[in-house]
Image: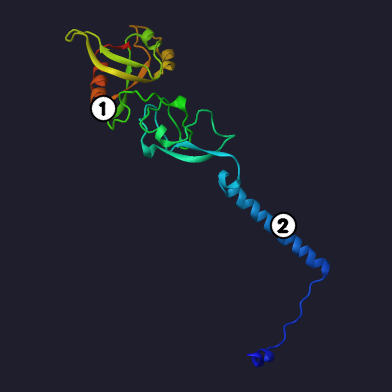
Amino acid sequence: MNILLSRLPALPDVRLPRGRRARMLRRCLAAALLLAGLLVLLLPPSARGAPATSTVVSARDLPAGSVLRAADVRTVALPDDLRPSGALSASDAAVGRLLSGAARAGEPITDVRLLGNSLPVTGEPGAVTVAVRLADAAVAELLQPGQRVDVVAGADTTNSASVLARGATVVTVRRSDDAGNHTLGPPQKGPLVLLALPAQVATQVAASSLERPVTVTLR
């Protein structure tokens, strides 16, 4: 082995001038620091050492009145300075709850965006929302999200007044529609109210609201 090595041509002794060597070392060090900085920026906040808390966010765009399922939400580590007050930390706290307003994908879910656990439709696979216009706009002004009401159809020429659904949950009230109701002719129905009901009941309520005046009684 030593004989073979002795026969190899000697490599030239490459030595950089001291000034040039120092400049190259500084450039390599600067490039290494820059690369390290970029890696730090790409790391999640928890890996960078920044204070972060597990936060529930919507996994996709969700409409108002959605009963949240496990696939609708996910958890991310959100920096504490960006985390909104009241944000949920565990998915279990959101699953089965009713979303009072629409949410974009990635939006943190806070306690004020969800209605109570005592909702009659909570956790039911067939729970849906139905939009109805109340016969009396003054009644709609008394409604708030999360409120429990009974849906009543008024009497007409062929039907007497009857209860269509009990324990419906108010999801939201579209009071902005009021401006478009000031027209000539007969009085218009009240604002649009979104109610959460089991699917089989919601269909009946939606159909009846098109043919008969509908109102609600407050619980």
Q: Which residue is mark 2?
A: 30
* Residue type, label 1: Ala
At horizontal 76% and vertical 60% (from top left) the residue drawn is 26
Residue 59 position within the rendered picture, expressed as x and y whole percent measured from the top left: 43, 39
Q: Residues within 10 Å of mark 2 (few under 14, many from 20)?
A: few
Secondary structure at badge 2 equals helix
- In the image, 57 versus 210, the foreground residue is 57
Q: Residues within 10 Å of mark 1 (few under 14, many from 20)?
A: some
Residue at 57 percent of width and 49 percent of height: 43
* Image quadrant where one finds the N terminus: bottom right
Q: Is residue 29 above or below residue 12?
A: above
Q: Position of residue 174 (x, y in %)?
A: 41, 18
Residue 132, above or below 65: above
Q: Residue at x 31, y 19 (%)?
A: 168
What x and y, as percent, mark residue 90? 44, 36
Image quarter of the C terminus: top left
Q: Which residue is mark 1?
A: 199
Query: Whole-Å distance between the Cαs marked 2 and 1?
Result: 64 Å
Query: Which of the marked residues, 2 or 1, is nearer the chain's N terminus?
Result: 2
Residue 51 placement: quadrant = top right
Q: Which mark is residue 210?
A: none
Image quarter for residue 139? Answer: top left
Q: Is residue 71 left or right of residue 45?
A: left
Position of residue 180 relative to residue 106, above or below, is above
Question: In this view, which residue lies farthest toward the left?
Answer: 158
x and y percentages locating residue 173 in the rendered image: 40, 18
Q: Secondary structure at mark 1?
A: helix
Type of the residue with mark 2: Ala
